[in-house]
């Protein structure tokens, strides 16, 4: 039985422009009259925000890949139970800034833990919950890292622990997203993230609105 709400996740490597596009998407869906909730990973709950700060603190050099994976899932399990499932049960459209696909891409491919381990944990932590639609904002890792560099110059804290990884890491993460997209093209839509904010947003809508209209959530003319 299809659930009451609709679950969208937005993914991509650091510097792909995800935060801006998610804000625009949430605003647009709300303006169309859809009850929309923004969720975030890691984070999204009080406990999740504490886990997020451990994960992203650049001083935490000694975090093992498996510890990292478990912490992302600890944050996710809390987020699912406290925020995401209740919102979906209440019929809301949940737009989540990353979900399990990020763990497959970053820890499975980036850290080399493999996707099978991530999938096993996903079943334990989240049951059968997966997004109805995933928008993968795809960009060349070198261009994305240049954006991370520009962003860094505007803030005092410098790069976080994940952003500090080398280009090779992000090449593997991107390969992970590309492989998932090839395996599940219906659920995971590739959105070219190069170009202006409004160009990319046009592509985001072109990917999201037909899927929402298929579920009867927006009119076809939208
Ligand atoms: P954010 O910057 O998009 O909020 O995500 C924080 C960082 O955490 C980003 O570098 C991606 C990374 N990440 C993982 O490595 N695995 C995960 O499961 C999630 C959700 C994020």
Image (cartoon, grey):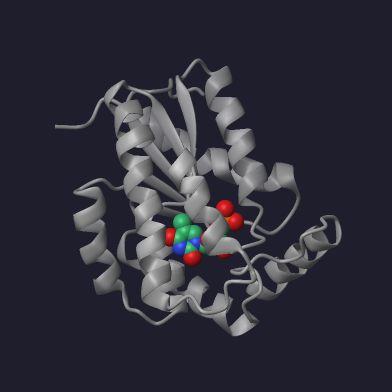
Q: Tell me residue 16's x, y (percent).
A: 64, 59
| Residue 52 spot, x, y in % from top left | 52, 54
> In the image as oriented, which residue stretches furthest toward the right?
153
Taking the spot 82% from the left edge, 57% from the top edge, the residue there is 156
Closer-to-camera residue (154/20): 154
Residue 205 placement: quadrant: top right
Q: Residue 178, can we see it?
A: no
> Which quarter of the rendered picture does the N terminus lie within?
top left
Which residue is drawn at the image coordinates 53% and 18% (left, top)? 32
Q: Residue furthest top?
A: 33
User: Which residue is depicted at the point 35% across and 54% down?
Assistant: 74
Q: Position of residue 141 (x, y in %)?
A: 64, 73
Q: Nearer the viewer, residue 1 or 38?
A: 38
The relative height of residue 112 versus residue 86 in the rendered view (above or below) is below
Q: Quadrant of residue 21?
A: top right
Q: Is residue 204 above or below residue 121?
A: above
- Nearer the observer, 56 or 206: 56
* Residue 93 seen in render: yes
Q: Position of residue 150 (x, y in %)?
A: 82, 62
Relative side of 163 to 183, left or right: right
């Amino acid at each position: 039985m299809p659930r009451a709400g609709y679950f969208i996740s937005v993914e991509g490597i650091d510097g792909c422009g995800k935060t801006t596009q998610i804000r625009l998407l949430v605003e647009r869906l709300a303006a169309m009259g859809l009850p929309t909730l923004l969720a975030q990973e890691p984070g999204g709950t009080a406990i999740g925000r504490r886990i997020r700060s451990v994960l992203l603190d650049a001083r935490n050099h000694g975090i093992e890949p498996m510890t990292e994976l478990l912490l992302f899932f600890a944050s996710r399990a809390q987020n699912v139970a406290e925020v995401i499932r209740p919102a979906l049960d209440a019929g809301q459209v949940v737009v989540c800034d990353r979900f399990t696909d990020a763990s497959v891409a970053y820890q499975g491919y980036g850290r080399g833990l493999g996707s099978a381990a991530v999938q096993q944990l996903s079943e334990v932590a989240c049951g059968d919950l997966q997004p109805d639609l995933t928008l993968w904002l795809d960009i060349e890792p070198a261009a994305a890292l240049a954006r991370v560099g520009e962003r860094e110059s505007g803030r005092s804290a410098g790069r976080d622990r994940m952003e500090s990884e080398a280009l090779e890491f992000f090449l593997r993460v991107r390969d992970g997203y590309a492989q998932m997209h090839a395996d599940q093209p219906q659920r995971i839509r590739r959105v070219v993230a190069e170009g202006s904010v409004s160009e990319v947003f046009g592509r985001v809508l072109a990917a999201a609105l037909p899927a929402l209209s298929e579920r009867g959530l927006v009119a076809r003319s939208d």
